[in-house]
Amino acid sequence: MLEEKSAIIDELQEEGLIWSADATKCPEGAFITLLHGGEWQKALVLEILDEAGARAEGLNRFFGIPFRFLNV
C-alpha cells in the first residue's frame, strides 16, 4: 500500500498536480482542486491564499464548496 501511494505521489509530481491545503508546507506551484460548477478544477494554492487572505484550514469555509487535498 505504501509503495502504491509513493508511486501515485511520484506521478502527480511529474504531472505538476500536487495538491496541498497547507500554505506553510506548500511549495510554489502546488495546486488545490476545487469542485466548482459541478467539475473539479485546479487552482494555485498560493494565489488563492494571497488573493483571498484565507488561512489554509479555512479554505472549505471560505469557498463554501468541497475541496480535496494531498499533503506531501
Image: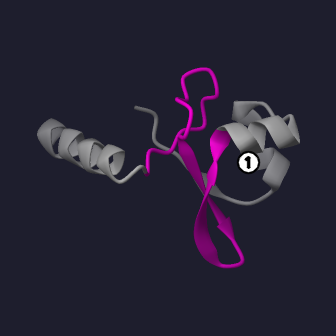
Could you tell me which quadrant the N terminus lies in? top left
Which residue is most to the top?
Answer: 24
Q: Magenta span has 28?
A: yes
Asked which quadrant contains residue 57, the reply is top right
The percent coordinates of residue 25 (x first, y second) are: 54, 23
What is the total number of numbered labels drawn onto the structure image? Answer: 1
Pick whichever, 39 or 16, lies toward us. Answer: 16
Residue at coordinates 83% horizontally, 47% vertically from top-left? 62
Residue lying at the far bottom of the rendered structure: 38
| Residue 56 image point, x, y percent | 70, 32
Picture coordinates of residue 42 (x, y %)?
59, 59
In the depicted view, which residue is nearer to us: 39 or 28? Answer: 28
Q: Considering the image in quadrants, where does the C terminus appear?
A: top left
Answer above or below: position of 72 versus 66: above
Q: What residue type is labelled 1?
A: Asn
Where is residue 13 drawn, in percent x and y? 34, 44
Looking at the image, residue 26 sits to the left or right of residue 12; the answer is: right
Q: Which of 14 and 18 is in front in this view?
A: 14
Q: Residue at x 67, y 58 (%)?
A: 66
The image quarter containing residue 52 is top right
Vertical position of residue 41 compared to residue 58: above or below: below
Q: What stretch is highlighted in magenta?
A: 17-45
In the rendered image, which residue does mark 1 sit on?
A: 60
Q: Check disc 1: other Cα within 10 Å, few if <14, some if 14-19, many if 20+.
A: some
Task: Please give the name of the residue rendered at 75% of the width and 44% of the height, measured from the top-left corner.
Answer: 48
Numbered disc 1: secondary structure: helix
Q: Is residue 37 magenta?
A: yes
